[in-house]
Image (cartoon, rainbow, N blue to C red):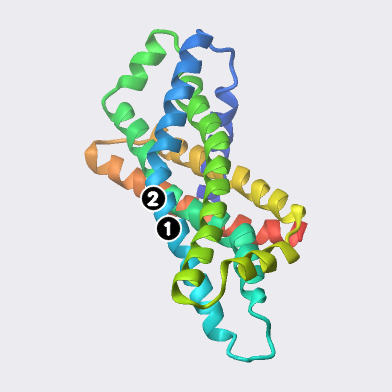
Amino acid sequence: MLTGFFFHFGRYTLLLKSMWKRPENGAIYWQETMRQMVSLGVGSLVIVFIISVFMGAVTTVQTAYQLVSGFIPRSIIGSIVSDSSILELAPTITSLVLAGKIGSNMASEIGTMRVTEQIDALEIMGVNAPGYLLMPRIVSALIMVPLLIMLSTALCIGGGILAGHLSGIIESSVFIDGARSTFKAFNVGFAMSKAITYGFMISSISCYQGYYTEGGALEVGKSSTKAVVFSCILILLSDYVLAQLIL
């Protein structure tokens, strides 16, 4: 098992190294990066919107349920929901969902190109296949995942405000006052560091699994599943490590 880990880690490192060669045509790389940004970013807006709003709403309702004592001010609900959204809910939960959506898409797309020998054709034509296939996807993930997580944070807090107002649990002004009272810019920076880390993990691991797919359609599905599973595991592991090191 340990031997297999070092084998895959070494091959993963060499694959990332090989994509840094000078691009044959910068314009083509730029176009592919823009296409991937639209696919990853715009294509994920709906799912991010849905999960973020409901995460904030559920967190507000459950927090209010636990704060049954009249000695605790209601504004603490806004503090808990906003801090939880910034530090954990938006970065981690959203990244886990994105790992299932964009990670499986990357792995299956590149894996299909591998089993249909399209990657072999690129190499025969003298194209740096790792650079052309991996670089645009990783760069687009490093840009779009943090932006999606920023949007998710805002929607999560907005969902909490909306749920509190509609259910009569807490007034919007009281919620906002509580959120402002405990807001720290450092938390936002920490969340963005997590977002960049998660974006790199999702894209690089998914591309690696797809790039080394062998066989046919069945193996493409297995590579896609492995990409999602490994990405989720490393997201949760890095979540703990980053919290331990930075907080």
Disc 2 secondary structure class: helix
The residue drawn where x is 50% and y is 70% is: 165
Tell me the kind of residue under disc 1: Ile
User: Would you place residue 174 above or below residue 229 in this image?
Assistant: below
Count of numbered circles on the image: 2
Q: Position of residue 68 (x, y in %)?
A: 58, 90
The residue drawn where x is 56% and y is 78% is: 63
In the displayed structure image, the side of residue 190 where residue 147 appears, left or right: left
Mark on residue 51?
A: 1
Q: Are marks 1 and 2 in contact (CB under 8 Å)?
A: yes
The residue drawn where x is 36% and y is 43% is: 223
Evaluate whether residue 182 shows in this view. no
CA neighbours of label 1 inside 10 A, class few (<14), some (14 to 19), many (20+): some
Q: Position of residue 200 (x, y in %)?
A: 57, 40
Tell me the kind of residue under disc 2: Ile
Evaluate whether residue 64 shows in this view. yes
In the displayed structure image, the side of residue 21 where residue 126 appears, left or right: left
Place residue 16 in its image quadrant.
top right
Disc 1 secondary structure class: helix
User: Would you place residue 82 above or below residue 208 in this image?
Assistant: below
Q: Where is residue 221 in the image (x, y as percent from the top left)?
A: 29, 45
C-alpha span from label 1 to label 2:
6 Å
Q: Position of residue 46 (x, y in %)?
A: 38, 47
Q: Nearer the viewer, residue 123 or 75?
A: 75
Determine which residue is flagged by label 2.
47
Q: Nearer the viewer, residue 12 or 190?
A: 190
User: Would you place residue 71 above or below residue 39 in this image?
Assistant: below
CA neighbours of label 2 inside 10 A, class few (<14), some (14 to 19), many (20+): few
Place residue 22 in its image quadrant.
top right
